[in-house]
Image (cartoon, rainbow, N blue to C red):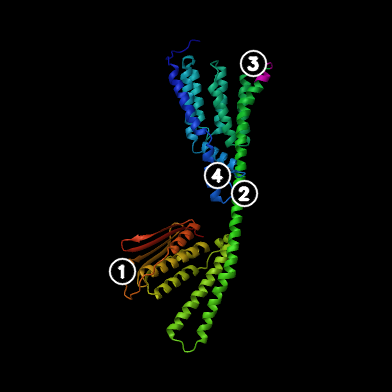
Amino acid sequence: MTNAPTVKITGAPGHLLTVGSFRVFWNVMRPASTTAARHRLGRRAAVSGQKQDPAYSLRRSRRPAHAPYRLEVDRIRRLLGRRVGWIRLALLVCALGYLLQQWPGLSPADAVLAIVSTALTLAGGRLPLTVVTGQSALLVLAHYFGHATPVGIKVLASVAVFEVVLRRWGPAAVAGALALASAYVAVHVPALPGGLFSLIYRIAVVVGGPVLLAAYFRSVEQVARGAREQAAEAERAARMAERTALARELHDIVAHHMASMALRVGVARHVIPETDPRVTEVLDDVHASATTALGDLRRLLAALRDPADAAGRPAGPDQLTATLEELIERARHAGLTIESSVSPDLAAIDAVRGLAVLRLVQEGLTNVVKHAGPAASVRLAVHTVDDQVRLEIRNDAPDRPRENGVRPLPGAGHGLLGMRERVDLVGGTLQAGPTPDGWRLAAVLPQPLS
């Protein structure tokens, strides 16, 4: 058979492409440096609260028992996930470089088979079983057409077996491995039975090797997943123990003093004769505030002891809205001019986020009184929009002269910090800062409506 006319290309371009693609592949696949790995381990341990050896540092550390698995599985996921495009591109360039190197001795049919094999490799992430079946068929076709030994097709077929075992563990993996093994048997049938040992050796290398490597990667991922689940469970248990201890302290100390204060103020209202009506009004307000705070503290204790139950227990139909109206009226009684807009859909949110809304409104109005003065004008809005609770409090400038002469009180900034922490706990966002005409506080709390 006469060869088709070919264009003579020197080996330099193919060599450069092959070396360049290998360097790209190595930069993607090479293991992380020991120092970088230790830095990552130190940061992860600091975040997760793992106990470290006293001599531990970011540069010289003792890794946790599951740390090597975590590093390795994270590396594997990056390689087979976000970087898979670069890996496939490197394989494509490498195959192109190989074709350019072998071009003077390749027929058009050889080139077509190699190009089809490379194109199939690019689809391995989505259709691994189809790719390994196609590579096996190309291997048989290349042999029976009697052309040059298809080394590139053999390598890409092994890569396809690796991918199908890694991504489709089970019947699909068995089918892919059997497809390539059957292709090798079909190719080497003329050499049987004398070449049986050689056939078994070839199948063990090109099929068994990728299968074992993929099985190892899968086992590493399973071990790492189990280690992460154990670490997460230990972290949840530690948080629950901390919540229980905090709830016990609040119940034994704070709740006791709060109840005692409410009781004594209630007694004072009745035992002091001929009290000025203004003093009686103040005592009534203090008693109501203490009673409300005691009820809030009890709800907080319930949420600390069983946060899952507290989160799943809905509030009463008008409880949250009514409590907000009470807070607004109390602020108006203190002298604020409030223009409020509260959505009736707030009754549908859970108890934890409802408590967050209450505390944000309470702290926001308190800050207005402290920093802008009791005669400030406030616009308050609490609405549910697109499965979110949106809260906004605006007030006029704090440096405006006040009619009653009351000066704004200085603050330490703990209130704003507490609001940010409370919003972060429920996965929301908080914005607070000055505006041209005053101050603005805005919060967004994610909440699927029930």
Horizontal and vertical percent for residue 394? Answer: 36, 64
197 is higher (above) or lower (below) than 307: above
Q: Residue at x 48, y 68 (%)?
A: 320
The answer to whether mark 3 and mark 1 are in CB contact below 8 A is no
Q: Are marks 2 and 4 in contact (CB under 8 Å)?
A: no
Q: Which residue is mark 2?
A: 230
Number of residues whose C-alpha sits closer than 10 Å to that of mark 1, classed few (under 14), some (14–19) or many (20 or more):
few
Q: Position of residue 5 (x, y in %)?
A: 43, 13
Residue 324 lies in quadrant: bottom left
In this view, the residue farthest toward the front is 55
Q: Earlier along the polypeptide chain: callout 2 or callout 3?
A: 3
Mark nearest the camera among 3 and 1 is: 1
Q: Secondary structure at mark 4?
A: helix
Closest to the camera, between mark 2 and mark 3, is 2
Q: CA distance from mark 3 to mark 4?
A: 55 Å
Q: Nearer the viewer, residue 55 or 233?
A: 55
Query: Is residue 5 located in the magenta-colored stretch of the structure?
Result: no
Disc sitting over residue 400 in the figure: 1
Q: Is residue 215 above or below residue 411?
A: above
Residue type of the residue flagged with mark 3: Pro
Earlier residue among tags 1 and 4? 4
Labels 1 & 4 near each other (Cβ < 8 A): no
Q: Residue at x 61, y 43 (%)?
A: 66
The mark lying in front, picked from 3 and 4, is 4
| Labels 2 and 4: the sequence-earlier one | 4
Q: Position of residue 115 (x, y in %)?
A: 48, 24
Q: CA distance from mark 1 to mark 4?
A: 53 Å
State which region is magenta: 193-198
